[in-house]
Image (tube, grey):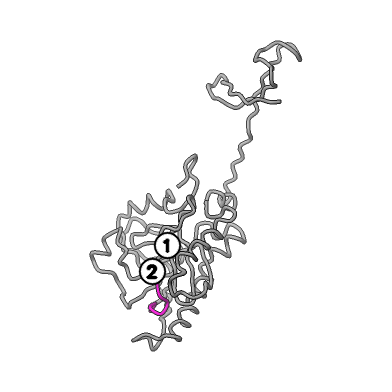
Amino acid sequence: MLQLRDSVDSAGTSPTALLAAGEEVGAGGGGQPGMPLRQTLWAPIVHDPTRRARVKEYFVFRPGTIEQAVDEIRVVVRSMENGDIQGVWLLTEVDHWNNEKERLVLITDQSLLICKYDFISLQCEQVVRIPLDAVDTISWGQFQFPRKSLNRREGLGIRIQWDKQSRPSFIHRWNPWSTNVPYTTFIEHPMAGADEKTASLCQLESFKSMLIQAVKKAQKESPGPGQANGVLVLEQPLLIETYVGLMSFINNEAKLGYSMTRGKIGF
């Protein structure tokens, strides 16, 4: 039988040591003279900085998490007139203040569902529903910032606009917590290219293709006023009007918008 005890070495650390039951700590006794009976075994620490290894830091990629989240979301939206789910993606939402937020995005027959899901406590916290027949513009392109902006981002994104409003009001535009913004913007999840499994779940290109098809189909089946020409699909820069961007810089660098491990703390 082996017992676990803590030893203190000369450096003052407290590793776990293995002792045979009934043995005492000392330099003498059985075995070779001068050989201590207690020996410290150190666990090997392997640092793997590759992108594939970093997938484990995100709670969403733990086995069964995505499946459980989708099942819970089905229950939440069951009472709504959404139709069947056509696809599920794990994307990053970028708000009008350039803050990144991890989101599950579902496309159904009638709706675009943007889900805020706590992958640590495994709870659906919020579902935002956008009727597909209300979408009027889908824009795809690089990000654009004011000339004097200190906080920028690279890469492609997709923006979905509805209710034929090109810009939010001044009050909502300068309120970082405002949710009354007539568009939403997505980029790929940071782990989109880590491996084949995450690639299929996080691909922005496949999301764009499915969304355009679903919007056109929904508007054809129930056309609204002023939608004779259908949804407008554009390739153009996506404007984010931030200048200093200190809050978003801290949020994005620390990845506070993602459910992931942070040393001994996960949030």
Above or below residue 208? Residue 57 is above
Label 1 crowding class (10 Å Cα cut-off): few <14, some 14-19, many 20+? many
Task: Find residue 137 and report its horizontal and vertical position in percent.
Answer: 39, 77
> On the image, numbered disc 1 is attached to which residue?
93
Residue 131 lies in the magenta stretch: yes
Residue 209 lies in the magenta stretch: no
Q: Nearer the viewer, mark 1 or mark 2?
A: 1
Q: Which amino acid is tagged 2?
A: Leu
Q: Are marks 1 and 2 in contact (CB under 8 Å)?
A: no
Q: Residue at x 45, y 58 (%)?
A: 124
Above or below residue 163? Residue 73 is above
The magenta segment:
130-136
The reply, left or right, for residue 55 in relation to residue 246 is: right
Task: Find residue 58 and report its horizontal and vertical position in percent.
Answer: 52, 51
The reply, left or right, for residue 52 in relation to residue 244 is: right
Label 2 crowding class (10 Å Cα cut-off): few <14, some 14-19, many 20+? some
Q: Residue furthest front?
A: 79
Asked which secondary structure carries label 2, the reply is: strand
**Residue 40: mark:** none
Q: In front: 118, or 184?
A: 118
> On the image, numbered disc 2 is attached to which residue?
238
Quarter in which the N terminus is drawn? top right
Query: In terms of sequence position, does the residue under pointer 1 or pointer 2 come before the other?
Result: 1
Task: Find residue 117 and report its horizontal and vertical position in percent.
Answer: 45, 57
Q: Residue at x 69, y 26 (%)?
A: 2
Q: In front: 107, or 227?
A: 107
Q: Which amino acid is tagged 1?
A: Glu
Q: Residue furthest right?
A: 31
Above or below residue 226? Residue 214 is above
